[in-house]
Image (tube, rainbow, N blue to C red):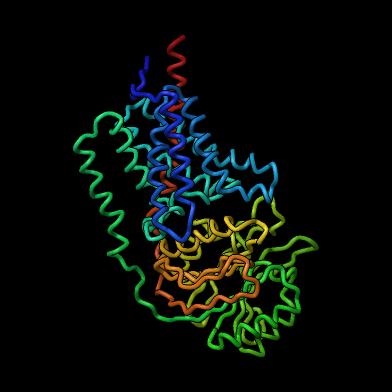
Amino acid sequence: MNFQPATPRSLTGKQSLCWLLLAVACFQAAYTSLRFPATGLFILGYAFALVRLTQQPTPRRAFYFGLAAGFFSYAPQFFFFWNIFKSAAIVLWLVLAFWVALFALLANRCAYRWGSGKATWLIPVLWTGLEYFRSEIYYLKFSWGNVGYALPPGANFLGMYGAGFAIFLAVGVWSFRAAGKMRWLDSLLLVPLVMIFYAVPFVTNRNSRSENSVTLTGVQMEFPSPGVVPKALDHALAKNPDSQIFVLSEYTCDGPVPDPLKNWCRQNRRFLVVGAKDIVTNDVYYNTAFVIGTNGDIVFKQAKSVPIQFFHDGLPAPKQELWNSPWGKIGICICYDLSFTRVTDRLVGQGAQLLIVPTMDVMEWGIHQHELHSRVAPVRAVEYGLPIFRLASSGLSQAVTSQGKVIAQTHIGGQDETLTARLRLPSHGPLPVDRYLAPGCTIATAGIVIWLIVLAWKEKRGRK
């Protein structure tokens, strides 16, 4: 069995270097600024250049060019890893880059085995399958840097993995056909794809019917002393007397919820969501958001589902439930939890109408870390058609409508700064279509890997 490369126009070294530089430059441009969402469309250039990089004469070269593209794309954006993990950050950047390298390798082998025509339609499957696995499934899961987070939030109506699938389908066709000759049929197939991708956000209005609304106020405080918190709440209440729910950040309390906070709720007849520790034994605890009722009692609590790897961040939550508040069903996910669709999907599946997200973003992690983290909430709001109230320890705190519009936010740092918004609760929040597509792509990618290994084994055996 003799296989010949299906893409004879393999890239030269100079061409590969040019495409590598373009991929890195477009990725950095896409993630440069929150103030100009349109720059996120540079991610299309990143995807196109990455697909072109897969057209190498050998699988080894495809892997190494993919590794370089991933490393030099991710390392500048996640340089704050160095502030947290020091030299170990290099290993983490390489781990993230590995998935880009694996995509380049697999795409290269698919074109080699089955021709560029079939590889065109496998490219979005491979990208989505690997992106979902690295973002949601294995131990070092980390979804930041995803294609969907770079795009303007409204483009994620298919879900952030669905947006990535659509982009890599389009650029796969353009890239492989542009290297030779694009057939008219391919062009016709792309027209409805592009129309749907950009038209649907303007013609759909999911969950437009609102039954109730609630006013929330949050106060940014990073590791406050216990005596300061009730005074800060008094000040926030004086400025926002109509607020019904007050929110404090993750780890506001370095232990159980103290009595002064319970007394504050009882005296002021307000609900309070506050991050504290649900102690198990000694130093073993659940990182928990507690809801204190207007009578001063704890009426609900939810532990963090995904503690941060390598941090002392508590035990993972044994279950996820909703707070049946007077205004509707409210889901609470803590900080990092919002980055994982498998966590938020469970809340939405139970009927959540609003998500409250107490967050710890330490100021010393840097401004860019705060900005990257703030990309998550608008995307989630669009995916589910749900409002989100995200209160961070030092910014950026956000109030986001069900259409993904940030209607209020604080400044980075901003100690004692308040965030207030009135949010309308929709009747329900459906799951986007990619929640079914992405796991299927991961299974399909595993099947492709196995089949490629079998074919390589047969080829090697046939040469003997």
Residue 82, image x and y in percent? 66, 47
| Quarter of the figure that contains the N terminus | top left
User: In this view of the protein, which residue sits in the foreground, 232 or 272?
Assistant: 232
Taking the image as shown, residue 443 lies to the left or right of residue 248, namely left
Can residue 332 be seen here?
no
Between 302 and 421, the one lying in front of the other is: 421
Q: In which quarter of the image is residue 169?
A: top left
Q: Is residue 53 above or below residue 168?
A: above
Q: Residue furthest left?
A: 184
Residue occupying the point 60% across, 85% down = 237
Above or below residue 424? Residue 178 is above
Residue 7 in sight from this viewpoint? yes
| Residue closest to the far top | 464
Q: Is 100 drawn above or below residue 380 in the view shown? A: above
**Does 171 appear above or below 271?**
above
Residue ID at (46%, 61%):
35
User: What's the residue at 63%, 65% (across, down)?
Assistant: 303
Outermost residue on the right side: it is: 282
Q: Quadrant of residue 292?
A: bottom right
Count every numbered label the image shows and give the total. 0
Image coords of residue 343 (percent x, y): 53, 59
| Closer to us: 72 or 436 | 72
> At which x and y percent is residue 424?
43, 77
The residue at the point 30 percent across, 56 percent down is 198
Residue 400 spot, x, y in % from top left: 47, 69
